[in-house]
Image: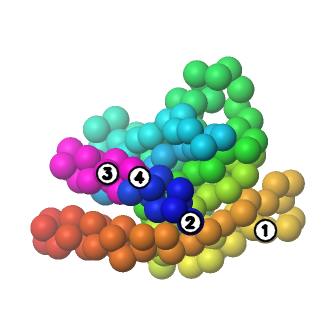
Amino acid sequence: MPDDLYFMQLALEEAQASAEAGEVPIGAVLVHSGAIIMRSGNRTIRNNDPTAHAEIIVIREIAQTIHNYRLTGATLYVTLEPCAMCAGAIIQARISRVVYGADDPKGGAFRSCFEILTNDKLNHQVEVTPGVMAAESAALLQSFFAARR
């Protein structure tokens, strides 16, 4: 759990940087063998790309760096429960574990709306640890959207 808290804090830093750039504050950190291999925040507005979620960015960038789309053994830390698109990418990349902060009642694909990451009909299931630094993750999102209203 101490490692989970450390890496989630780094994901929160990425989320904060995204908020400061005018993006929805979601951050992701990809870890393998205890080392950070990629980190990013959302870039959908900056990139004019609806698929530029933090999770997708870290998966794309590391896959291109290592010349392999399979990320077996990796853990993805993300501040918000992944959406269906991101969950699909996580499955395709064969990421072993996801640790996330806040639940997403309007689009979460672990337990809130869908159950993609652990669906036994799929060829890969992911170990999921929800709720790590959930209050901090939710507060960042709430303050971001409150400032926009």
Can residue 82 be seen from the camera position used here?
A: no
Disc 3 marks which amino acid? Answer: Glu
Q: Could you say which quadrant of the image residue 34 lies in?
A: top right
**Residue at position x 38%, y 57% from top?**
9
Count every numbered label the image shows and give the total: 4
Q: Are marks 4 and 3 in contact (CB under 8 Å)?
A: yes
How far apart in space, not on screen, are marks 2 and 1 (Cα)? Answer: 25 Å
Which mark is first along the chain, 1 or 2? 2
Main SS of residues in magenta? helix
| Quarter of the figure with the C terminus | bottom left
**Residue at position x 58%, y 51% from top?**
76
Give the extent of the magenta segment.
10-22
Disc 2 marks which amino acid? Answer: Met
Mark 1 surroundings within 10 Å by alpha-carbon count, few (fewer than 14), some (14 through 19), many (20 or more):
few
Relative to 13, say whether 4 is above or below.
below
Q: Are marks 3 and 1 in contact (CB under 8 Å)?
A: no
Q: Which mark is residue 13?
A: 3
Badge nearest the viewer, 2 or 1: 2
Q: Could you say which quadrant of the image residue 135 lies in?
A: bottom left
Q: Is residue 16 magenta?
A: yes
Residue 114 rendering spot, x and y as whole percentages: 64, 73
- Label 1: state its secondary structure: loop
Q: Which mark is residue 1?
A: 2
How far apart in space, not on screen, are marks 4 and 3 (Cα)? Answer: 5 Å
Badge nearest the viewer, 2 or 3: 2
Q: Relative to residue 134, is residue 37 drawn left or right?
A: right
